[in-house]
Each structure stands twice: as C-alpha cells, then as structure tokens.
Image (cartoon, rainbow, N blue to C red):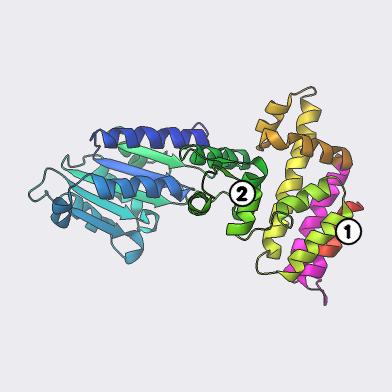
Amino acid sequence: MAKIYAKDTIAAYERILSDLKKKVYKPIYLLMGEEPYYIDLLSDYMANNILTPEERGFNQLMLYGSKDISVTQVIETARRYPMMSNKQVIIVREAQQLKDFESLEVYTKNPLASTILVLCFMYKSVDKRKALYKSVDKAGEVLETVQFYENETVDWIKNYLKGKKCEITPDAAQILFEHIGADLSRIANELDKLFTLLPEGSSKITAEHIEKNIGISREYNVFELNKALNVRNTKKAMLIVEHFRKNPKEYPMVITLSTLFGHFLKLLKLHLIQRNQPGINDYALASEMGVTPFFISEYKTAARNYPPGKTVEVIRLIREYDARSKGWNKGAADDGELLRELVIRIVRS
C-alpha cells in the first residue's frame, strides 16, 4: 500500500466534502486515521446537512462504540428503512471501540441504499488487507488521515489563515507548532481566537499576538531554546531554562525534552542527507527533513556547531535526562535543575 501524506488526506477530504455539497451520497463512509480533525469535520457536516431538521428526528442516529453497543445493533439499525424521508443517517463515533469491528463486513458488502452509515474510526486505521475495508472502498468512501509532520503543520496553519484572508509570520507559526504540536483541532481553535482578537485593520498574526492572547512567551519558549542551542548561546539558553523552572506547569519537562529530542533528531537527519546527497538544495533538504524551508539556514548553522558525532552525543544526553526526570538516578534535583544541567552539557558537548 502506498504511504499516505497530509496532502492526500486534505485532497480526499475536499473531494468527499465537494460531493456531499452536491448531494452525491454513498451508502458507507469510513473515516479513519491518526488525525481526528478531518474526521470530525466530515461527520459534523453530514450530521448537520444531509437531512432537514424535521427529518433528523426520526431518521438520524448517533451511536458510540464506547457505549457498549454491538456490531449486531449497528447492522440492525442500518438495515431499517427511513420514515417520511428518502434517507436515514447513522453516525458511529469511536467505532474503533466496537468489539469484533471487522464483522461489520456482513453489512458493508451489501449496504442498504437508503442508509448512509458513517464509521468514525479514530486514532488508527482499519487493516486494508481485510474484507471490510475492501467492501467499503468498493461501495462507499474512505478518508484516511495521518499525523502531520512539522512542515506540513506549519503549511496547514498558513493555508487555514489564508482562507480567512489572514497571514501569520514564520516564527509565530513555529511557536504555535512547538507549543501545541500537530493537533489540528487545538491549533484551529487558537487561530480562530487570535483572528477575532486582532486589532482592527490588522490581518497578520505575529509572535506578539500569540504572547498577548495565548500566553506563550515569544522570548521564552522551546522554539527559542532550540535557536539558542543552535548557535551555542549559553546566556540566552540559561535565561529560557530559568523561565521554564519558574513556570513548570506551562513548560512541563516531558514536553521540553520531547521537543529537544525531535530537534536534534532532525539535525542528525540533516547530516545523513548531506552525506548521502552532497549538493542537495535547501528546498529539497527541508522537504526530506520535514521542516519549513524558512528555517533551513538555522539548521545548517546548528550542523556546523554540532557535527554528527556531537549530535549523536546530544541525543544520548537527552535520553539520559529523560530517564532521570522519570526517577532513574535522579537524586535530589528537580526538573528545573536537571534541565539546566542538560543544557550546559549540550552546549559544552
């Protein structure tokens, strides 16, 4: 099976949504995968737009796999005929929690034309080798979502705001990603809030707006810590660490270490790509690393300060301090002290 990328998820979502808006319906929709954002968007659209408000009372049902319903109940409900309507809509949320989910194939290989069955299979994908997937793929529509990479998430942020005729500076988009990760639903909520709070006449979100309205410091965050480490700026790095130490709830150790680990892992990937593809251009390099081209010069600076052997040593140090923060050989040091010690060792590595 071909690998699915963010662009494939978005293209499939847009195609299915376009058909729904044209009232072109399929009897089964399997919405599955790691990223729930597009699954929620499509299932919400179908819940609110296929049937009229009058038809929904008798012909629309929301079921939950976590509520101890059985596959048999889903099948029996799907095989009923609508009342005073041409269609009935059945949405099964958290379908991944249905016991014996694959036995739905009894229905999916011969679905009722008057039923629109929507299966929301969250945070993972159905086995494409099984009969159920093949029958849905043949008779209905499949949306497979994937977790976005860093560069895909930053591009998504830009495109999301573009649809609102708004822009965001590269550092603001990166800070938002470093703080939230690739959780599209949370990012969309924060962007919607920022958009409504922009000063009149302004259409660009900056790091200042994020600091003022979301509470993420534009000077003291993991993104800025990575930048300070890139150039071995000990003073700036220690100021950020001290800010983290004073605000442990806002900057939990586990998130900080995870972000540092990911950063140096990308740096190691840069070394490997440059070794195997000498002369590779910056755009291609950024694409293979999974980062935004805007920041590739910073990674190159970091590569000069942390050659391959030192990069590997830094990754080893981060793993060591991750274990220590979780209790291994921790001693009396708190998380802030451990982070300070780690940063000093990284800069001096």
- Position of 269 with respect to 344 (left or right) is left
Q: Quadrant of residue 95?
A: bottom left
Lateral position of residue 341 relative to residue 83, left or right: right
| Front position among marks 2 and 1 | 2
Residue at mark 2 to residue at mark 1: CA–CA distance: 25 Å
Q: Position of residue 36 (x, y in %)?
A: 45, 50
Q: Is residue 325 magenta?
A: yes
From the viewer's perspective, is 19 left or right of 85? right
**Residue range highlighted in magenta:** 309-338
Can residue 137 be seen at all in this image of the molecule? no
Q: Does 296 sit left or right of 147 as displayed?
A: right
Residue in the foreground of this view, choosing between 119 and 138: 119
Question: Could you say which quadrant of the image residue 98 lies in?
Answer: bottom left
Q: Residue furthest left?
A: 84
Kindly report the secondary structure that dominates the magenta region of the rendered protein. helix
Which residue corresponds to mark 1? 344
The residue located at (25%, 45%) in the rendering is: 49
Indicate the amino acid at tag 2: Phe
Provide the secondary structure element on which disc 1 rests: helix
